[in-house]
Amino acid sequence: MSFMKITARFFSFEAVSVRTVAVTAAMSYLLQINAIVSGEPLYLIALYTLLPWLPIAFYEGIWKVKNYAAVAFLGIFTVMQVGHFAEHLIQVLQIDLANGTVACPPPIDNIANAARGVALGVRDALLEPSFYSVEKIIKPGPDGMPITGSDGQLLSGAAACAIFGQLDLEIVHLVWELIGLFGTAACLYFFPRNVFLWLAFAGLSWHALEHLTITYFYYFDQEPLWEGFRQLWATYPTVGNSYVAHPVGKEEAMLNFYHAGGKFGLMAKHGMFQQLTGFEGMPGRAHLHMGYNMAITIPTVLGFLMEVKVIKNKYIEQAFGKLSSSELVDLSLRVKNRKFAKGDTVFSQGDVANNCFVISQGSVEIYLNKGKPSEALVATLSAGQIFGEMGLLDKTAKKRTATVVARTKLECLEIDAATFADLAAGSGSGDFQSDGTSENIKKLVEVRLAENRNA
Amino acid sequence: MRPTLNFSLLSFFIFSTEAFAASGPIAKGFGADDWMDKLHVVLTVVGLVAVVTITLVTLILSKKSD
């Protein structure tokens, strides 16, 4: 089973129907188009594009954790870390490639900034503040006024706070860091021999030093002891609901430890290390923290890829415990998730048999002669148990020997006839070479026959 | 351009927050001495992270040896 196929299967929707995915995609597309046509800024276009996917991603995530256990948790966690790293990377690209200004969270088109826009003569006095975040910032000089380029034009660029810059808050950084630290520890608890996860854990421990220190200063060290200034902005719309921040000077202010210099943290340029040693070669905070997150995310991804190679559905593992590890991986990738409502007939006695099932959630009742005077309940099966195998083992008729009804809301993993025949054949030919599995299937048939006789 | 849905209201509730110049310069008079005055904070954080890390590693390794 190829590695790419395994990874692709893991990231595909298994619990959600194609129809649900199609409806969600259509909703996402409509909201995206609406946001674009309405002239919304990039962060709202991104938000409305992602919103419809959240419920089904959540549902699918829960299903994956139930079926694939800890590997699924690691996979979801890895996706979140990649998303977080992407935000850091985008911020750095905005700084380096889009002439960005780091003023995070980005200035907002609020009452004060709008009023300065009117006073500056760049905004219509009748235009109400929108409370949107700006997407573009005109660069301020040391005096807090705009910098002009050699061509006489104002220097401007992106508000370099990534896509969702409104979340660029110290508390968000700290919470995410701690989720990373404890989440990676939880993954290591299940995969303690995964060396990549240990590397990520070491990076997260170091990163925690930075964020705990910075966040402490931000919230708990409020004494205004240092002379400094606060940048003042005027805001006005450009195209649609995109706003720009125009620097209009600075106001003198007494700053607390965080604003005076603590915001740079321990190792970034202007941070503690530079202050104590005089070494000026450290990268700025945005670049350093992108680096930290790269050092955390790359091993997390490698750690996940190492584990996903041997991903097994736990219900398949329960039902076919005699298969080898690689055979369980193979079989887990061949099954399809099927759902039935309470009371649904999964199949009826006499139907053509072309598959069998492993129960992953709920239970079923197996009846002989259902609906006839001789109707008899022969068995009740639940999670991890197989049904539908008798018809497949019938070498001539290939007919269902009983009727199966969902006793509760039911989820099953469907195994096709060819795969089951391979499993039942044992060693010698086919992809599955487990004589133990073949023996277990024979024993299961004997149990079923005994149940039928006793009914 | 008028939005076809009222995005601004949502934007106000979710995103409204004060902006500050995170890239601004260091304040006048701020330097090594100020960091030295806060050394107890840094050392407390180092101690806290060390304790948490060692505890987590111990828990993980105790499971590994099960």
Image: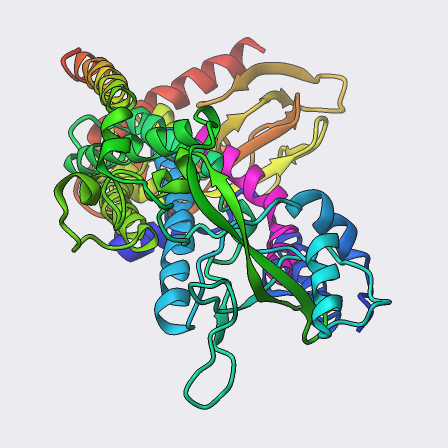
Q: Residue at x 16, y 43 (%)?
A: A428
Give percent across and percent down for residue B39: 24, 24
Give percent across and percent down for residue A325: 22, 34
* Quadrant in the picture for residue A185: top left
Q: Is residue A272 above or below residue A124?
A: above
Residue A22: say if magenta: no
Give percent across and percent down for residue A333: 37, 45
Residue A57: say if magenta: yes
Q: Is residue A450 left or right of residue A432?
A: right
Residue furthest right as drawn: A126
Q: Nearer the viewer, residue A313 or A48?
A: A48
| Region rendered in magenta | A44-68
Q: Residue at x 76, y 24 (%)?
A: A371
Residue furthest bottom as drawn: A151
Give percent across and percent down for residue A12: 46, 51
Q: Is residue A385 left or right of residue B34?
A: right
Q: Which coloring applies here?
A: rainbow
Observer able to see residue A397: no
* Quadrant in the picture for residue B48: top left
Observer able to see residue A427: yes
Q: Is residue A238 left or right of residue A303?
A: right
